[in-house]
Amino acid sequence: MSFYSYKNCNQDNCPGPLKGDARGLREKVCVQVKKVYDSCMQQEQLDKVCVTVSDMTPVCGCGGDATAPFTPPLCFESCRSSGYTGAIRNLIIDRICDRPGFARVRCAVDIPIDVLFTDSSCPCREGLAHGTVTVAKDVILCIPDESIVPFTMESLVSAVCVSGRYCGNSTFELTICVTVILKVIAEVEMLIPSYGFCSVPPCEEFAENVCDEFFSLPIFPQSPCAANSSNASNCNNQTACSCSSCTACKC
């Protein structure tokens, strides 16, 4: 049966025109979105985390051979997350009997990072490598009831290194600041009020107007001498002159 069928007896919860004083709203529309049922954030500092990196590639050569392998020992420079989506592994959800709707959520969140380093060659070469920092989570979240469309867990991540050192065998020991946001989501169809379609304005093309300052200059040059002479003439023609109002006249 269609949303708009006359046989549909639940049209109040279906798309269609709005009735009464809608204050600019035009209709009810059905949109498909990701609904966030619950979410939480944790920020922590991880000390002395050992990360084994791979895919070492040169960033910029300082005179050495870009195709040659890096000369150990390596020197840590910096690191940060290379993406904002974390990979959730080993997810376990246990509902809490004395707290209806809530559950204990345990999982491991993998955060992708990029590590910047230099090697010991002369001259030195700068390189970039990829690694993963794993953070264990054990939190309480509101979990929706069972349904045909299942809910899923997603994570939003960010990380930046405070310090680090090279330990050998492509492994770095890092002190890293980590932010992890866990979300309980589901793909749903939501009925919302609408003002109609957006009015798309025309594009404004970028133009570097380097001549604007030059074009703003006067066409003909101004004479400061002529301006001073005019001020002195006006001062001499005044019958009463005040020192505070005319500096070119001697009182």
Image: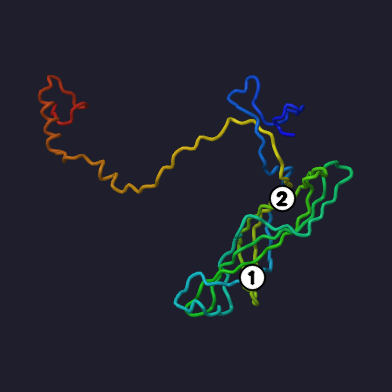
Q: Residues within 10 Å of mark 1 (few under 14, many from 20)?
A: some
Image position, residue 193 (x, y; %) = 64, 30
What quarter of the picture does the N terminus occupy?
Answer: top right
Determine the residue positioned at 78% across, 47% down. 150
Rendered view: 160 above or below 37: below
Label 1 sits on residue? 53
Along the line of sight, the residue nearer the viewer: 162 or 160:
160
Determine the residue positioned at 36% across, 47% down. 207
Determine the residue positioned at 49% across, 37% down. 200
Along the line of sight, the residue nearer the viewer: 243 or 229:
229
Residue with the most extreme right position: 97
Label 2 sits on residue? 182
Q: Quadrant of residue 70?
A: bottom right
Image position, residue 164 (x, y; %) = 62, 67
Along the line of sight, the residue nearer the viewer: 85 or 166:
85
The local secondary structure at tag 1 comes to loop
The local secondary structure at tag 2 comes to strand
Q: Quadrant of residue 101?
A: top right
Image position, residue 160 (x, y; %) = 61, 59
Q: Is residue 38 left or right of residue 173?
A: right
Q: Quadrant of residue 189?
A: top right
Q: Is residue 130 left or right of residue 103?
A: left
Amino acid under disc 2: Leu
